[in-house]
Amino acid sequence: MLLVGNGILITRDAANPGYRNGCVAMDGSVVAEVGETCAIRAKYPGARFLDARGGIIMPGFINAHTHCYSAFARGFAGKGPAGGNFSEVLERLWWRLDKALTLDDVYICAVVCMIDCVRNGTTTILDHHASPRAVRGSLFKIADAARATGIRSCLCYEVSDRDGEETMREGIDENVEFIRRVSSDEDDLLAGTFGLHASMTLSDATLEACAKAAPEGCGFHAHVAEGIRDEYDSVKKYGKRVVERFRDFGMLGGRSIAVHCVHIDENERKILKDTGAAVVFNPESNMGNAVGCGPALEMYGAGIPVGLGTDGFISDMPRSLHMANALLKHNARRPDAAFAEVTGMLFENNARIAERYFRLPLGRLAPGYSADAVVCDYLSPTELSGANADAHILFGMSGRCVTSTIARGRVLMEDRRLAGPDEAEAFAKAAEASKKLWERF
Ligand SMILES: [Zn+2]
């Protein structure tokens, strides 16, 4: 039994929202109960006690869309001029960088990315991977990193036609093999879904092959209408819009994720809603790639499960929350917009989306939920209560406030000391490997 207590406890459980001096009792990988620290400690006198020292205890963060392989892009100046639009960014940076990845690089990227997750209190990620010159075994390398660091990971390989037929086939096989291998993961650490890059890099023949090969009910994870070119391409080549296209191949449903959806129209929104597919909003990525701001508020309001991701830019979910709030307010020209929606995306919808792939329910500190928690060091200049806690998180915290991270009942970091792989060694290896990758880019 592990107790995490002596802090302000935010449970995210509507029936029992929090305690001024609260404690979570974790029995293995599951939350057993929550209550006042003194009562819980008295009930479990022999249990290990992790002292929050008056900080904030809350559920671990979930990143609903990321790319671990982007770790090697940080600080890279590129070769030649930077992309002047989103298509050029893909062609000049990402599609050259991912081609330079080896299987060893895939593992090293994933380890440093996941250490960053532990540091920022992100306990679950939904990753979307590409390494066209090292497809086979790549998801298993990321899975090794998940086992080493303890980050719960739902993985997929992004199938695409951009590197030819053979690589496309390898991508299909990698998805199928990984999904089959982790389909009954008793540890609740790994899950798989079927990855697709984007409509504009997938022919009808390829989509048909993917739909045919995908194991029953696995769900698909695809970029959808991120740039306007994706919609133009779909209408021009196939006479229908991107969401209609994925629907027609049976790729939308309650276990599928349509990432971005910046340029979808009202009918596409309706299709997403009818099929139960989730959407992931990635504010920093959308701003950084200058693709525009999608109808995230409208989709959220229509009852589509819209979650929050970082698209590989960061692993810091409070920072992503700040960006989501500012971008959606700015875009709506409404200072009173977005607050409820962005906190709903991060704290509620990300859990509902991620738990579609895992055994235990996520995102609450309540009995029966997965034992994923963070302790944050946060000194409030104003009163903090259950009613305004989200505003404190939004305006006062970042991932680096996290001092302790617990996932599946295992302590991954305590008082900023990591329990997993040696951090300095992992980052030194990454620096060395990324330097070589930059040279062959
Ligand atoms: Zn992405």
Image (cartoon, rainbow, N blue to C red):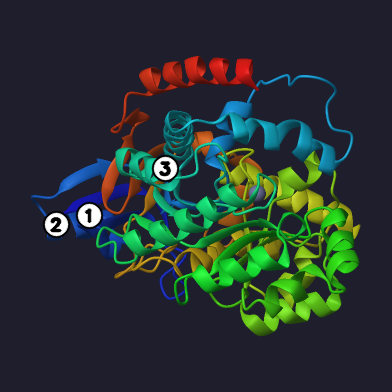
Say whether marks 2 and 1 touch (CB < 8 Å).
yes
Which amino acid type corresponds to the residue marked 3 in the rendered image?
Ile
Instruction: State the mark number for residue 142.
Output: 3
Q: Is residue 137 above or below residue 218?
A: above
Residue at the bottom extreme of this rendering: 274
Circle 2 residue: 42
Res. 278 image quadrant: bottom right
Which amino acid type corresponds to the residue marked 2 in the rendered image?
Ala
Q: Does the residue labelled 2 lie within 8 Å of ligand 1?
A: no
Tell me which label, 1 or 3, sits earlier in the chain: 1
Q: How far apart are marks 3 and 2 (CA)?
A: 41 Å
Mark 3 neighbour density, 10 Å: few (under 14) some (14–19) many (20 or more): many
Q: Does the residue labelled 3 lie within 8 Å of ligand 1?
A: no
| Residue 408 visible in image | yes
Q: Distance between the residues labelled 1 and 3?
A: 41 Å
Mark 2 neighbour density, 10 Å: few (under 14) some (14–19) many (20 or more): few
- Residue drawn at x 37%, y 18% is 425
Residue 323: percent from the left, percent from the top? 72, 46
Circle 1 residue: 38
Left or right of 371 in this view: 280: right
- Residue drawn at x 80%, y 44% is 287
Q: Is residue 115 above or below residue 60?
A: above
